[in-house]
Image (spheres, rainbow, N blue to C red):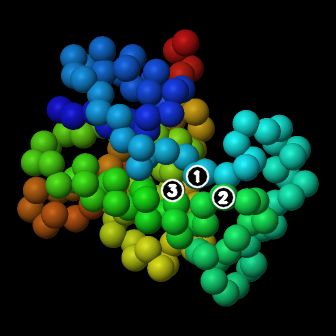
Amino acid sequence: MELYSSDLTRTAQTARAIAQRLGVEPTLVAGLREKSYGEAEGKAQTWLEERFAPPPPTGDRMNHHEGIEGAETKHEFASRIYDAVSAILSSPCSHQVLVTHGFALTFVVAAWIHLPLESAGYVNVRSNSGGITVLEQDGFFHNRTVVSLNDTSHLAAM
């Protein structure tokens, strides 16, 4: 079993707790980080909301600049996640655990099912903190399945 995580602090802390339970060492991967909002990093959510330019309903949503200096476009963000998932899946290990962020999960799932990057402009997979998504590839047809998405039932016991 292998465990990969975003290298950002809170996600890496979660990964270390999971790794201890599973008896593995986590591998921190910068490519699994949440979308960068450039100069908005560390500022209040209201600061971002006052400046944010939402993507258009049609057209080039992937390369849209949201009005925040230094922010990743959706294309840059998704490409980074796709590359990280591809590198992780190149390992021959049959069981892999990924710990990442809410919006990043959208592109982990999209990369997993081989959704073409240029088609990802409208996709969004909603998730909660602590939600578990299970992805599985069958050994016969090699089809990829989203077995469960954002399961939080384990949190009710806490």
SS of the residue under disc 2: loop
Q: Are marks 2 and 3 in contact (CB under 8 Å)?
A: no
Judged by depth in the image, the label closer to the viewer, 2 or 1, is: 2
The residue that appears at 67% across and 74% down in the rendered structure is: 64
Q: How far is disc 3 from disc 1 in space, using C-alphas?
A: 11 Å
Tell which circle, 3 or 1, labels the residue nearer the N-terminal end. 1
Tell which circle, 2 or 3, labels the residue nearer the N-terminal end. 2
Instruction: Give how far across and how far down residue 118 sits, in percent.
Output: 47, 79
Say whether residue 127 is left or right of residue 133.
Answer: right
Q: What residue type is labelled 2?
A: Ala
Q: What residue type is labelled 1?
A: Lys
Instruction: Give how far across and how far down residue 127 sits, in percent.
Output: 57, 44
Say whether residue 84 is left or right of residue 91.
Answer: right
Say whether residue 82 is left or right of residue 33.
Answer: left
Q: Are marks 2 and 1 in contact (CB under 8 Å)?
A: yes
Q: Mark 3 points at which residue?
A: 106
The residue that appears at 58% across and 33% down in the rendered structure is: 129
Tell which circle, 2 or 1, labels the residue nearer the N-terminal end. 1
Mark 1 closeness class: few <14, some 14–19, many ≥20 residues within 10 Å:
many
Q: Mark 1 points at which residue?
A: 35
Mark 2 closeness class: few <14, some 14–19, many ≥20 residues within 10 Å:
some
5 up-or-down from 127: above or below? above
Q: How many marks?
A: 3
Q: Quadrant of the N terminus?
A: top left
97 up-or-down from 24: above or below? below
Q: Which image quarter: residue 146?
A: bottom left
Q: How far is disc 2 from disc 3 in space, using C-alphas?
A: 18 Å
Q: Name the residue under label 2.
A: 71
34 up-or-down from 121: above or below? above
